[in-house]
Image: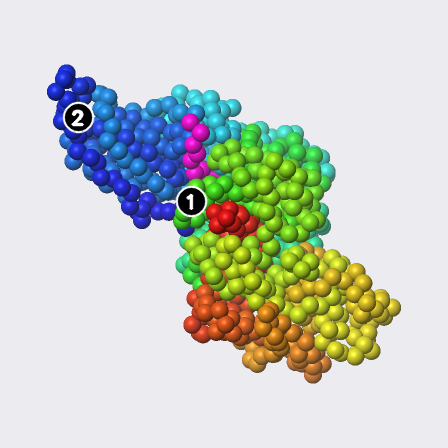
């Protein structure tokens, strides 16, 4: 599990009795008990040392605490063993809320005769590692101070303390001390230093502590591209005041935040959103919004108790929530045709200060060009982002590790991660037992990588799509950083089977490492298994758009019987031609034509249906299908959703990955009655034939049935097919655990119907929570498969 709670951890804290003094001589500290303690977990940068100091002092213990590359080291002494026992009992139970204790080792040591309890300087050598804290949203105490006109940090956009503020984004190396962060550029003023050194202060040893006198500063400059002409405005108050004015006037702002740049505009100003969408070449992909507070968010989306907890959590991610049906004033271009809206609340002091003087809801999207990493540095932003924005709100606290906003959604009372980045990374996932050091180098789209060490899996933040040099350079930077932080030198690099993925090519170029190919959908299923601590075998249902199969075909509608080492392909969608290869992904009407042809419809009917794209063009595609030219076979469930979307007239061409299937989900009725039936043939593997489904959809469409009803019926039919296949596999294999993975299961309607139907038939169902179901989670599965094979062999 991720982030083991100190309260749930039961370390061995029994302290051996102090032996009697030796008869020869009188040892130093005679009559004194002493214990040495090593604490590992997320215990640096979360106020753990100040907590230890205050706890030890309250119990009148003497000794010291310090950070080391191997965790937090504590030495405590007392004349009464009972006090040491109380210290060890309270240490894990009362640890700071942001701390996460993974292990606590206590052993008797020789007393040293300490006169007081102190916090010592950190050790920088030793070869160990610590679990690093992610960046944390602003805490209530800092918000109160920021809004207090009498406080010296009133309206200071970089206020922070031990309980909040930047962590991973500013850490250059461990141990987590100010000289090892980008805050080393800002020497503390006497007031901040006094707080930093005061054990009773909330900022005791808070490494990013600063104030207007000694900390980072804020300024506003025109982009030079938006027609604005004003002099650079220095200082937080005037810069923010001008920035708010520009936003109210419909201008677009480039804002340097915690992990990189946001691009912001008024989400209720249709023209501003149109300009931003056009400038960013965003096509129809939804924008996220940031609301000033929870009450404002409730005007635009439906917010339940769980949603409120997610939005207000220390991670403060983007949360996908149902939009209100009545008019809200939100521009229709924010999330065109989508029933859900990605909403977040301000998570830094800078964001909080922006939401004043009438600013209520802003588009807050990543500052980057499509498919490139988020921009983090000022000079890079001034060069790359200027064509998109009218002005820049800049600061001089350097960002060492860029991070996108994380995206989550609520599902059946739990939180599911859709994109894992700020607030989650670099939190490790506890695998339950030690693993050899392995790297899973990820897939192609929504790229992440994963490193294993001891019992932990360390996933990178969202890198992006590995389609350009910028993303590859970002990948290499993060790999070096996480490898250095955690001291990982993998023995094996696990990679995808696809020979043309840049991640695979990179892996094959690492000739000093052992390389191991892991099939795409096996990695999907094992990533889900690893989250839940399952060894297998399980029935794995992996539905996605594209994954290179063991037979060289394009897989994507797969049922596997899998454990962490190997898998058997138990069933799959029948192959149809992917007409024109990747062109069929961008043009779902090609997949519709392919499925109509495979379902046996007469060619004149197909040609009439495809006439909007040219009869000659359609004829050539049918010729390609008949002759298997430039049309690799695919069993992809994602492409089947694309085909149905086009057949129903919902989406014929896409502007971003998954758009056709997403639009189909948005128009589909959840309560639609009736089912279409997939054919099931053979046994090893079973072939799942969608031909009758396609023919029935064709008939219903031409009878005039509502698209919403047909779409809902199709979703229910896929869920029913999953249950039928799993029932057969339960009889054949004796397995009742089912893991659902792959990007298609980000479809909330399909996932809900599938989970409910499986549970009604007595299956134990596991879905993703900590890592994405899409390719953003595949690196975890690769790494665990690689480690398991190494251990197994």
The answer to whether residue 679 is visible is yes
* Rendered position, 628 above or below 104: below
Residue pointed to by mark 1:
434
Task: State the image quarter where residue 476 is shown.
Answer: top right
Residue 492 place in picture, x, y as percent: 55, 42
Count residues near mark 2 (Cα–Cα under 10 Å), then give few for <14, some for 14-19, many for 20+. some
Q: Is residue 541 left or right of residue 126?
A: right
Task: State the image quarter where residue 195 is shown.
Answer: top left
Q: Is residue 712 left or right of residue 279?
A: left
Residue 424 place in picture, x, y as percent: 48, 45
Of residues 18 and 696, the one drawn nearer to the viewer in this rendering: 18
| Mark before the other along the chain sequence, 1 or 2 | 2
Of residues 258 and 16, the one drawn nearer to the viewer in this rendering: 16
> Magenta: predominant secondary structure element?
loop
Which residue is outermost to the bottom?
Answer: 703
* Rendered position, 396 above or below 789: above
Residue 614 place in picture, x, y as percent: 85, 68
Residue 587 place in picture, x, y as percent: 74, 62
Which residue is found at the position 48% from the left and 27% from the top? Answer: 180
Residue pointed to by mark 2:
32
The answer to whether residue 275 is visible is no
């Amino acid at each position: 599990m991720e982030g083991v709670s100190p309260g749930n951890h039961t370390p061995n804290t029994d302290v051996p009795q102090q032996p009697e003094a030796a008869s020869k001589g009188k040892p130093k500290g005679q009559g004194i008990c002493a214990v040495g303690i090593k604490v590992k977990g997320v215990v640096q940068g979360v106020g753990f040392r100040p907590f230890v100091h205050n706890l030890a002092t309250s119990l009148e213990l003497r000794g010291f605490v310090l950070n080391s590359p191997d965790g937090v080291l504590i030495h405590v002494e007392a004349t009464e063993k009972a006090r040491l026992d109380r210290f060890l009992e309270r240490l894990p139970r009362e640890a700071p809320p942001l701390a996460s204790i993974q292990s606590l080792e206590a052993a008797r040591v020789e007393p040293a005769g300490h006169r007081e309890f102190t916090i010592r300087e950190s050790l920088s050598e030793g070869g160990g590692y610590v679990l690093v804290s992610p960046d944390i949203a602003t805490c209530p105490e800092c918000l109160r101070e920021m809004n207090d006109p009498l406080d010296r940090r009133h309206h200071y956009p970089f206020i922070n303390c031990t309980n909040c503020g930047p962590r991973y984004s500013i850490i250059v190396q461990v141990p987590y001390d100010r000289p090892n962060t980008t805050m080393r550029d800002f020497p503390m003023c006497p007031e901040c230093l006094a707080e930093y050194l005061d054990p009773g202060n909330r900022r005791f040893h808070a490494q990013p502590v600063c104030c207007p006198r000694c900390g980072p500063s804020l300024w506003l400059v025109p982009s030079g591209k938006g027609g604005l002409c004003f002099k650079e405005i220095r200082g937080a108050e005037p810069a923010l005041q001008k920035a708010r004015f520009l936003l109210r006037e419909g201008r677009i702002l480039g804002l340097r935040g915690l992990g990189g740049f946001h691009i912001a505009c008024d989400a209720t100003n249709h023209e501003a959103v149109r300009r931003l969408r056009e400038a960013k070449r965003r096509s129809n992909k939804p924008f996220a919004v940031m609301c000033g507070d929870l009450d404002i968010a409730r005007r635009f989306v439906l917010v339940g108790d769980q949603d409120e907890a997610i939005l207000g959590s220390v991670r403060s991610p983007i949360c996908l929530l149902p939009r209100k049906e009545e008019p809200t004033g939100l521009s229709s271009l924010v999330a065109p045709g989508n029933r859900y809206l990605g909403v977040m609340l301000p998570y830094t002091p800078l964001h909080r200060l922006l939401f004043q003087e009438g600013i209520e809801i802003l588009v807050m999207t990543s500052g980057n060009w499509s498919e490139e990493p988020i921009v983090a540095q000022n000079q890079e932003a001034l060069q790359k982002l200027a064509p998109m924005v009218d002005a820049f709100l800049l600061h001089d606290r350097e960002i060492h590790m860029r991070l996108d906003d994380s995206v989550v959604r609520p599902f059946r009372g739990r939180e599911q991660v859709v994109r894992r980045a700020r607030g989650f990374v670099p939190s490790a996932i506890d695998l339950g037992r030690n693993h050899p050091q392995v790297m899973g180098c990820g897939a192609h789209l929504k790229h992440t990588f994963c490193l294993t060490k001891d019992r932990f899996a360390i996933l990178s933040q969202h890198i992006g799509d590995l389609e350009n040099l910028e993303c590859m350079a970002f990948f290499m930077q993060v790999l070096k950083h996480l490898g250095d932080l955690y001291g990982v030198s993998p023995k094996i690099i696990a990679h995808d089977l696809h020979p043309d993925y840049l991640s695979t090519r990179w892996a094959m170029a690492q000739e000093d490492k052992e390389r191991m190919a892991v099939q795409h959908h096996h990695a999907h299923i094992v990533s889900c298994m690893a989250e839940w601590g399952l060894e297998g075998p399980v029935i794995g249902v992996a539905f996605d758009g594209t994954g290179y199969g063991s037979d060289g075909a394009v897989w994507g509608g797969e049922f596997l019987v899998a454990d962490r080492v190997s898998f058997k392909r138990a069933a799959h969608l029948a192959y149809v031609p992917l007409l024109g290869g990747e062109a069929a992904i961008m043009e779902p009407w090609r997949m519709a034509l392919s499925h109509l042809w495979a379902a046996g419809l007469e060619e004149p009917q197909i040609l009439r249906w495809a006439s909007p794209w040219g009869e000659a063009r359609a004829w050539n595609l049918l010729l390609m299908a008949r002759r298997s030219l430039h049309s690799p076979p695919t069993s992809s469930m994602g492409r089947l959703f694309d085909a149905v979307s086009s057949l129903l007239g919902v989406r014929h061409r896409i502007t971003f990955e998954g758009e056709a299937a997403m639009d189909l989900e948005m128009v589909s009725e959840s309560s639609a009655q009736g089912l279409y039936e997939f054919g099931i043939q053979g046994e090893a593997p079973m072939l799942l034939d969608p031909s009758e489904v396609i023919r029935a959809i064709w008939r219903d469409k031409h009878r005039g049935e509502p698209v919403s009803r047909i779409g809902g019926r199709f979703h229910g039919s896929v869920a029913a097919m999953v249950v039928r296949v799993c029932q057969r596999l339960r009889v054949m294999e004796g397995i009742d655990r089912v893991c659902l993975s792959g990007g298609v299961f980000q479809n909330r309607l399909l996932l809900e119907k599938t989970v409910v139907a499986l549970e009604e038939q007595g299956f134990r169902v596991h879905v993703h929570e900590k890592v994405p179901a899409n390719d953003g989670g595949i690196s975890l599965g690769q790494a665990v498969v690689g480690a398991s094979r190494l251990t197994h062999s």
